[in-house]
Amino acid sequence: MYHKTTPYRIFNVFNICLLVILSIMCIVPLIHVLAVSFSTKSAADANLVGLWPVQFSLEAYKKTMNNPIFLHSIWISVCRTVLGTGLTLLITFLAAYPLSKETSVFRSRNVYSWLFVFSMIFNGGLVPFYMVIQKIHLMDSFWVLVLPGAVNTFLVILMLNFFRGIPKEMEEAALIDGAGHFRTLFSIFLPISMPSIATIALFSMVFHWNSWFDGLLYLSNAKDYPLATFLQTVIIQKDMSSMSMSPKEMELLSQTTVNAAQIFIGAAPILIVYPFLQKYFVKGMTLGSVKE
């Protein structure tokens, strides 16, 4: 067998070593941030923290979780991620299903497909987009974080290609039994499309959770910022107006440890959700469903 040959074994060892190195490069910074967040002010300011906390302390997390602006930004990000992901999935399903049909069934399929592709390649630019947002009165509203990114052409194409791989016999059987297109979509296509749905949901969740520029651009009140925008203003722009500390807190806390705690809390939700979606990434749920 080919997997027992010497070249294959060498490649396998090299591949494993490379993936281990890349994994360590991704994990070590996160462990360092976690260690800094659990360390004391003196250790963090002296840059003595490596991959293990120095003089274990929970003061940074106490300060972070007692900050109402930080908690409100988390709530906005949660609402944005849930609503944005749900809306993106719904629109993606409804757009990908008709576009997955042959031209004999949907005559205008090619026209709409090229319109989607054109919108993915070309756009009006930041200034015209800002003017559109302003004209439709979405400025300083929660929906400005959700609606502009509701349609993602890449995700539509991804779902479209997955739908086209589903055996036609399954759809034909549903139509013969009297099911309409909506019933076929939600009862036949979606249940067996979990790998694609999980991938699209994860892409959308990561986009909404990590997006910071739109909040900075379209929201004028810092209290309405989502978490990513809040962290950008505090850590990158070093705007500490929302993280005021009393003299006593300044003796116990370092801005470095507080920032590390905020970064880890911001990254934790995606780290928690990812393992539950990973099992759906392997395609093959329709294999063997129809025998020709």
Image: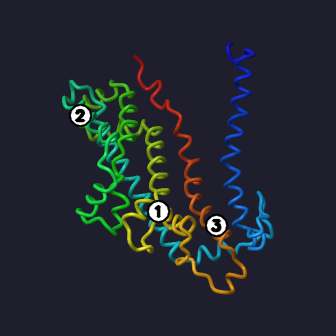
Where is mark 3, residue-wise? 261
Residue 17 x, y percent position in the rendering: 73, 33
Could you tell which of marks 1 and 2 lies nearer the N-terminus? 1
Residue 78 badge: 1
Residue type at mark 3: give it. Ala
- Element marked by disc 2: loop
Residue type at mark 1: give it. Val
Binning the other alpha carbons within 10 Å of mark 2 as few (below 14), some (14 to 19) or many (20 upward) gives few
In the rendered structure, the answer to whether residue 206 lies left or right of residue 218 reads right
In the rendered structure, the answer to whether residue 41 lies left or right of residue 172 reads right
Residue 202 badge: none
Compared to residue 131, the image places residue 188 above or below, namely above
Residue furthest toward the bottom?
247
| Residue in view at x 62 percent, y 61 percent | 264
Q: Quadrant of residue 16?
A: top right
Q: CA distance from mark 3 to mark 1?
A: 18 Å
- Element marked by disc 1: helix
Q: Nearer the viewer, residue 56 or 21?
A: 21
Q: Is the C-beta separation of discs 3 and 2 under 8 Å? A: no
In the rendered structure, the answer to whether residue 24 lies left or right of residue 109 reads right
- Element marked by disc 3: helix
Could you tell which of marks 3 and 2 lies nearer the N-terminus? 2
Residue type at mark 2: give it. Gly
Where is mark 2, residue-wise? 178
